[in-house]
Amino acid sequence: MTTISPLQDWETSFDYLCTALIGQLANDQYLVFELTAENSHFVRFNNAKVRQTGIVVDGLVSMKMIAEGRIAYADFPLTGDKEIDLSVAQESFDYLRAEIFELPPDPYIVLPSNQGSSHEVYEGSLLHPDEAVNHILPVVQGLDFTGLYASGSLIRANYNSLGQKHWFATESFFVDYSLINGRDKAIKGCYSGRSWDDELFRKHIEGERVLLQRLDLPIHEVLPNSYGTYLAPAAVADLLHMFSWGAIGEASIRQGGSFLSAMRDKGKSLSPMFSLQENFAGGSVPRFNNFGEISPLCLPLFQGGKLVNTLINSRTAKEYGLRENGANGGETLRSPEILAGNLKSENILSAIGTGLYISNLHYLNWSDRPSGRVTGMTRYGCFWVENGKIVATIKDLRFDDFMSQIFGDNLVDLTDFQEFIPNIGTYGNRSLGGSLLPGILLKAFTFTL
């Protein structure tokens, strides 16, 4: 197996471009450059057949100019052709230099600095584009297999005019798929990593086949109520994502938009079994943020249910007189991990007793963000359990519950294993990273429809 060969030397091209523009700066002017680039192979499957395949080689530079307390932005493509790239970049540079003084001053502007550079490259063992289909399709023959395979190199970089250079490159893949049983029901799965393993992929599919067969069970009508519920890691990932939507960021807490604001003010905690941290040790995302700052390798957020840190970026720190901790501009989770518990895989059904086994959630939203009330729907591979056995499937249900209950009073246990749930977004560019999560067992989870 070989990796996808890059079509351009991204680092050389990016460095050349940045150096050329930085040399034109006047005194008291700054430039910050960010690069988002990829060399990706995509294959779309439907009914275990290839429907679309192709290679994407793409680079985008985001340039930020700062002068006299003002800030202006411009984006342009990076092609690897020095003459073309410099021409396009020069046009953007000239535009920013002319327009920046028409903008109002920014009272919380964050000036770049040089606190040292970094260079991280994580190589993988990926399927060659000519071989990928032959490694995937034989394993799923006889199944209605529908999904997307994406593989290749991803690059992020952040340079500034003070000489600081951060470079991050990684190789990864994912197969995001559904197995459909012919009755408008499906099992959702995702196999991902840096190194393709035929045997692991086969075992992954075989495990999902077991759940697929259970979709033929009769449908159990679940009435609106609260039920003992197990949420698999993929479902937990959807709930955890809500922490990035105006919950764990310090600015949102200070402005009263987060349920953690009242918790912190009143000294309340979540379950002592709940511990959440930002953990960059896996190398799936860069530690540097859009300000060019390096985050701690591990930043605890909740320890034993107690909120010990929030995500604080430099703008928030400046506004409220705090110390930043490497958070990005949106103060969102980038490499989250919920620590494991004690519930073993073979004991999940017996621990449910009678209740619900939920594999996936979707359409999540805040129904009341300041109080931490979240709503959404069940989806894919959800079952009714009686006396520790799966006995029926269910129709899609709407839930509406409080995060403080889900990760607080109603949390019975977490699994003793974790799964890496990758970010599989491809809108604009292929996403980096993911979440390392256990499943969770709740004594009550409220369903409203």
Image (tube, grey):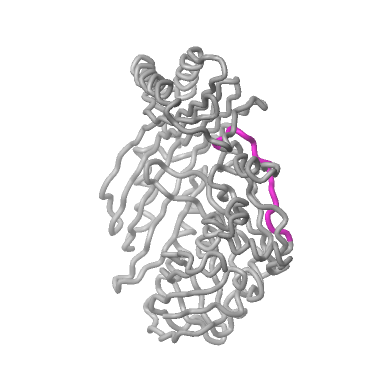
Residue placed at 57% from the left, 54% from the top? 252
Residue placed at 65% from the left, 43% from the top? 317
- Horizontal and vertical percent for residue 76? 37, 28
Work out which quarter of the rendered image holds the C terminus and state it.
bottom left
Front position in the image: 51 or 166: 166
Residue placed at 56% from the left, 87% from the top? 387
- Horizontal and vertical percent for residue 114? 64, 25
> From where the camera sits, is residue 9 visible?
yes
- What range is drawn magenta here? 290-303
Residue placed at 51% from the left, 56% from the top? 245
| Image position of 202 (left or right of 45) | right
Q: Residue furthest left?
A: 51
Q: Is residue 78 above or below residue 359?
A: above
Work out which quarter of the rendered image holds the N terminus and state it.
top left
Residue 370, quarter of picture = bottom right
- Horizontal and vertical percent for residue 109? 57, 34
Number of numbered labels in the structure image: 0
- Horizontal and vertical percent for residue 325? 67, 43
Residue 301 drawn in magenta: yes
Front position in the image: 147 or 370: 370
Front position in the image: 62 or 277: 62
> From where the camera sits, is residue 282 visible?
no
Residue 208 drawn in magenta: no
